[in-house]
Amino acid sequence: MFEIKNKDNLGRTGIFKIGDSKVKTPALMPVIHPGKVSLDVKSFGAEIVITNAYIIYKNDKLRDLALRWGVHKLIGFDGPVVTDSGSFQLAEYGDIDISNREIVEFQEDIGADIGTSLDIPTPPYAPYKKAEKDLEITLERAKEALSSRKNMMLNSVVQGSTYANLRRRCARELSRMDFDVHPIGAVVPLLESYDYKSLVEVVMASVECLPPSRPRHLMGAGHPMLFALAVAMGCDLFDSAAYMLYANDDRLLTPSGTYKLDGLKEMPCSCNVCVEHTPQELQAMDKDKRRDLIAAHNLYVSFAEIRRVRQAISDGSLMELVDQRCRAHPRLLDAYRRLLNYQELIEKYDPVSKKSAFFYTGPESLKRVEVYRHHRRLNRLPKKRGLVLLSAYNKPYSRHVPEDLGEFFSQAPVEIDEWQFMVVDIPFGIIPLELDEFYPFSQNESPSTLDVESENFISSIIKKLEGEYEAIIVSGDVNRRFNLGFKFRVEPPHIKFSDRDRLVAVADYQFGKGAGKALFNGNLQIIKSKKTGRIRYVYADDELIASIRTSDGFIIPSWKGASLLHSSLDYPRCRVVVNEESEPFAREGKNIFAKFVIECDKNIRANDEVLIVNEDDELLATGKSLLCSEEILDFSHGQVIKTRRGRR
Ligand code: GUN
Ligand code: ZN
């Protein structure tokens, strides 16, 4: 059973329960070669390992011991053990002499915690017909594995070569069946040829159609420089044979690439091995001892990177880490850029608020999901007739607008009295002044020097806006910086918007069109923080409507506020519908579990404030969604909504 704890882009940290064990994900599973002495991987942080059932089966002595002792004792690991089926050998040698049913039963007989059916790893760029035919067999074998397993959990590998439609078909069919983990297979040849761009296409096609409630294992990706990128695509499990294979070849892994021992003058990290030995000492050792020391270094850095990735997800800074890692090799940069084309899919899963500020780290940042989401959500605000574009000052912008705004320009003479004020800034392009305290507009940093991509980004946004407003006026500074060529000198605008305007804009932006009018209609009393001057509480006729969260400017509706939203936003907007059984619990303000949810608004994202209703659309409670709509509906266990208050 899998539970999500924290999310960032498509990445998630979670707990994967296997029997009595709980494995923290993303997790790295060292490959243990049966019959060879290995390092004590547990002491490096391994909570789960993987070994090969086919190799055990083929060796009379190992098979005998495995059947007698069980696989855990055979390989000397008392936590969860995953076994692979021999598919890899099938891919390498073309043929193997065991049936799918036999290898699945054998894995169960030796006590594997998670077994694997005999999928066919079709290589990249295979002829389409072959990939399709292989896929049929892989799916048949997956079904057969389900019918022959008893208690063992099952992997079911997504295949389909480099054909996105085949990967999607495979993922969709497997997700309808009762598997526990979905490996993504046949990517090793892509890794070996540095074809990370195709890796992105393959993984994203698979992940798009896999159920978010099951962990995904990127098979054969053991190099730590790939972990952050793969996790950002939604992968939860990795296996590493690399730590030993690279060590055998005197190569040291690091999160930014590989070092050959004979080129090293200095050891590359601060692990025990690197601190206690020089490259020259290692060179002088006998082969076995050197291999074990390098393998130890490789495991240290691999587990350190997995921990760093988990921390980044919890902080909400995973993409900053991906950005750093993908600058280690031009092919990785290609992959990162490819990933940024999947904004629509990523947006569905990315939380709407995070702990970390958004850092602009280069033109790629302009394509990050926060920027994409902002431009989609801008449509939630009502349109004014005219638009004023101001230079960006310090954040929050509205508090730093200077007395003297300087010169203003337009394309043609203007006569308009209804203006929307927006600040022009990187990376979000245009930010309505009313939203300047909302996440992530006061929580982001970008360099003061502009790159060409940012310049073009801004000027193309402004070009598009020209069709949407009767008139646009820009400050002289914006006009010059972004080469807009506005010629007519106009009067500087008189910037004015009320606290109510601010609240209405934030509500529309956060909950959707019309929410602002619903919430902030009455005779408002607004309480501000003495220290920061920011709005903290809003009352209407002495009744609390909402509080504003200091960390991200989000509106947290009170019971009254939630009732106002509920009565003015049409079903199913902002709603999570729970069944009869859970109704009394919801009313008492107890948290909502996935198994009680029947339906929900498709626009709900993790960290959104939501309305909890019954099947008759009666408001039962309000809460914060921990997951997005796809996840809420896919999971059948675990908490999905943190309830704030029930109907008293
Ligand atoms: N190990 C690396 N790639 C694969 C794959 O595609 N299938 C299986 N079963 N194991 C693998
Ligand atoms: Zn080291």
Image (cartoon, rainbow, N blue to C red):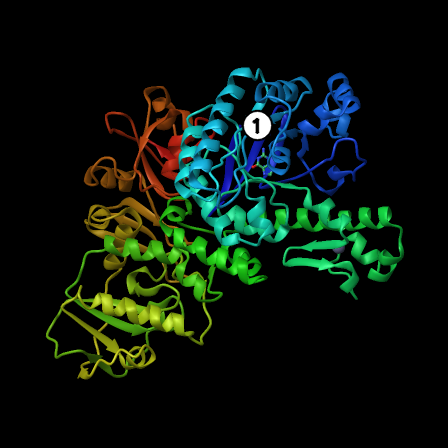
Residue 405 horizontal side relative to residue 217, left or right: left
Whether the residue carrying mark 1 lies under 8 Å from ligand 1 is answered with yes
Kindly identify the residue that appears in the image at 45 percent across and 40 percent down.
206
Seen from the viewer's position, the closer of residues 593 and 336 is 336
How crowded pointer 1 is (Cα within 10 Å; few <14, some 14-19, many 20+) is rated as many
Looking at the picture, does residue 153 appear above or below residue 291? above
| Rendered residue at 81%/46% (across/down) | 292
Which residue has dot 1 on it? Answer: 118
Q: Can residue 415 be seen in this view?
A: yes
Q: Nearer the viewer, residue 201 or 372?
A: 201
Q: Residue 290 at what x, y percent from top left?
A: 84, 50
Q: In the image, is residue 78 above or below residue 275? A: above
Q: Answer with the quarter of the image where residue 531 lies.
A: bottom left
SS for dot 1: loop
- Indicate the position of residue 339 as horizontal and vertical percent values: 45, 53
Q: In which quarter of the image is ligand 2?
A: bottom right
